[in-house]
Amino acid sequence: MFELQPLVRKNIWKLEPYSCARDEFKGVSASAYLDANENPFNNNINRYPDPLQEKVKEMLSPIKGVPVSNIFLGNGSDEAIDLVYRIFCQPGVDNVVAIEPTYGMYKVCADINDVFYRKVVLDDDFQITAEKLLEACDKRTKVIWLCSPNNPTGNDINREEMVKLLVKFQGIVVVDEAYSEFSNQKPLRLDLSQYPNLIVLNTMSKAWAGAAIRLGMAFASTDIIGLFNKVKYPYNVNKLSQEKALELLRNQSGYRQHLVMVLEEREKLMSAFNSLPICEKIYPTAANFFLVRVTDANAIYRYLVEQGIIVRNRSRVTLCENCLRITIGTKAENSALLSALIKYKP
Ligand SMILES: *Cc1c(COP(=O)(O)O)cnc(C)c1O
């Protein structure tokens, strides 16, 4: 039987959250709002925003296949990542286990929160085994961090191994599915009800074309969502972002069109890379980027910068020696990249 309480920091479990004016008063529409010391003159932003972003969640729920009560929204995924540490990890005492290489924010937030961060290096195919990750855990391991499709490697993490971890590990398993829209693997968020220790992260920043509005999501049990809501800043997602999110989510045909274009461009760009002299290995991807091992990553990176083309140099990252990470751009951007690389002289 999974028990949540022993995993949660005692001060957080006991925490009496800030009660904002809009929490106490919900649903009923009044003729005068004299409770929150706001400016009464309407300019669309004079009132505090909905602290629980109900409209956005209602719109997201059918799109994501997750009930409203299992959704947390934050100021980017970054907020959800930080909250996981603040809710579950006692600074200076607890540790987390994460795959390596992966997204850098899990480690930065561990360091900020003074939580020990244990790395388990992926195998040569950038895959995990549940066994190896469990071996790295001890009594003080509160969280395992997974990312699928993984950044910067681009591949799906083996779903059966993730499920094994969810079943065997008694702590929290976070699976960051920031890129799941680009993948054919069934997202774990659709199996949320089976795993009380699962937290899935999603974001508006990638497939949904909303990086600037800073809107991240966490999907989890209602108990875990309750903890997120208790610890977050009261009005953590501003009104302009909530409105813009609704606008993006309403435009599903635009979203699909762009998704299809990115996936088509991904195939074209990768096969064009195959015949470039600088290309040594293209790693399989299920995201809107791919990792490529080249002849000389540092030199090629600098050359591209001179041409006004910025890619991500990942050559100092574990298992990514001489690798560049290339985001799929527009047709024009991708062909600019290709023609620059065709002209490249070592
Ligand atoms: C880009 C990315 C995110 C998005 O973070 P936001 O704070 O929501 O913009 C989350 N996780 C991974 C692995 C990413 O690559």
Image (cartoon, grey):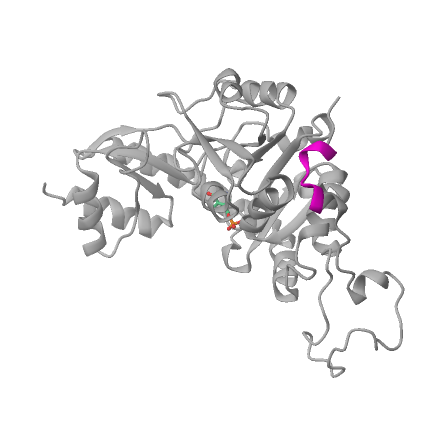
| Left or right of residue 262, residue 169 in this image | right
Residue at (38, 41) in percent of width and height: 265
Using the image as rendered, state which of residue 166 and residue 311 is in the foreground.
Answer: 166
- Residue farthest along the left direction in this orientation: 346
Residue 324 in the image: state x and y as whole percent. Answer: 29, 39
Can residue 14 be seen?
A: yes
Using the image as rendered, state which of residue 103 and residue 172 is in the foreground.
Answer: 172
Residue at (21, 39) in percent of width and height: 297
Using the image as rendered, state which of residue 37 and residue 289 is in the foreground.
Answer: 37
| Left or right of residue 305, residue 7 in this image | right
Residues in magenta, as a range: 5-11
- Residue farthest along the front direction in this orientation: 92
Is residue 274 shown above or below 22? Answer: above
Quarter of the image that includes the N terminus: top right
Residue 140 in the image: state x and y as whole percent. Answer: 58, 29
Residue 115 in the image: state x and y as whole percent. Answer: 51, 40
Residue 159 in the image: state x and y as whole percent. Answer: 55, 22
| Left or right of residue 279, residue 334 in this image | right
Report if residue 99 lies within the magenta region: no
| Left or right of residue 294, residue 33 in this image | right
Residue at (69, 79) in percent of width and height: 43
Q: How many marks on residues? A: 0
- Residue farthest along the bottom direction in this orientation: 41
Can residue 61 be seen?
A: no
Quarter of the image that includes the C terminus: top left
Is residue 3 shown above or below 266? Answer: above
Asked which quadrant contains residue 189, the reply is: top right
Report if residue 9 lies within the magenta region: yes
Asked which quadrant contains residue 36, the reply is: bottom right
Dominant secondary structure (helix, strand or loop) of the stretch shown in magenta = helix
Residue at (62, 23) in percent of width and height: 166
